[in-house]
């Protein structure tokens, strides 16, 4: 793998491998944007799987919908949601095998509320994977005071009954955290 590229962008393959995404699973990408992770996930879960593309930005979801139509994806469901609100996401409780929160928590002051809502959707034994910016000084990315410390995420997740499994590096600028729902 090209180390330069890995250091500059998120390593999708690594993240999806760590999350355990596999054929036939139900997966949601909370804060999906234009679908950077959604489409690779859809290919992995296949026709028997389902991917929820969840975002609060309707323009991002329109972009996802256009690509769904252009590329004939039948296993992706775009969902508008304010997932800072408990039960605000139109995903059934305890229905997801995997939930992803990639570069999302730093955008909100309601980190606990977001983790609570995402946790609600993950089934027992399911995985919640969080990826955020490392707390290092960079000329790009969110301001240092907006970045989310990994120990802060772990503390909130444990209070929600999630079992902390692993912290891993995602390239040079990001960290990943894996939790299992007990």
Image (cartoon, rainbow, N blue to C red):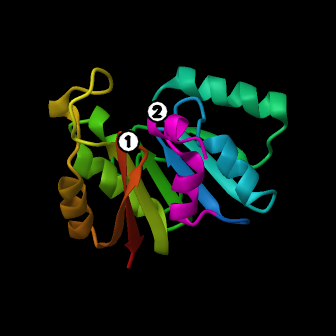
Specify whether residue 62 is in view.
yes
Image position of 96 (left or right of 161): right
Name the residue: 41% across, 46% down.
88
Kindly indicate the quadrant of the structure image that contains residue 17.
bottom right
Q: Residues within 10 Å of mark 1 (few under 14, many from 20)?
A: some
Specify whether residue 90 is in view.
no
User: Is disc 2 placed on a helix, strand or loop?
Assistant: helix
Question: Where is residue 36 shown, x and y percent of the image?
Answer: 59, 36
Disc 1 to disc 2, how far (Cα)? 7 Å
Question: Where is residue 176 shown, x and y percent of the image?
Answer: 38, 54
User: Where is mark 1, residue-wise?
Assistant: 172
User: Is disc 1 placed on a helix, strand or loop?
Assistant: loop
User: Where is mark 2, residue-wise?
Assistant: 8
Kindly indicate the quadrant of the structure image that contains residue 155.
bottom left
Segment colored magenta: 1-21
Question: Where is residue 168 shown, x and y percent of the image?
Answer: 38, 59
Question: Where is residue 19 shown, x and y percent of the image?
Answer: 52, 62
Image position of 169 (left or right of 18): left
Q: Residues within 10 Å of mark 2 (few under 14, many from 20)?
A: few
């Amino acid at each position: 793998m090209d180390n330069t590229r890995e250091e500059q962008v998120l390593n999708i393959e690594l993240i999806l491998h760590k999350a355990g995404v596999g054929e036939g699973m139900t997966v949601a990408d909370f804060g999906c944007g234009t679908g950077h992770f959604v489409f690779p996930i859809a290919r992995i879960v296949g026709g028997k799987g389902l991917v929820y593309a969840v975002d609060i930005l309707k323009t991002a979801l329109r972009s996802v919908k256009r690509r769904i139509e252009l590329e004939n994806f039948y296993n992706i469901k775009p969902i508008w949601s304010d997932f800072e609100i408990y039960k605000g996401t139109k995903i059934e409780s305890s229905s997801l095998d995997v939930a992803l929160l990639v570069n999302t928590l730093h955008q909100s002051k309601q980190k606990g509320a977001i983790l609570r809502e995402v946790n609600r959707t993950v089934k027992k034994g399911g995985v919640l994977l969080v990826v955020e910016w490392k707390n290092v000084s960079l000329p790009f990315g969110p301001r240092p005071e907006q970045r989310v410390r990994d120990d802060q995420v772990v503390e909130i997740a444990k209070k929600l009954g999630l079992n902390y499994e692993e912290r891993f590096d995602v390239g040079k600028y990001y960290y990943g955290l894996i939790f299992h729902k007990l």
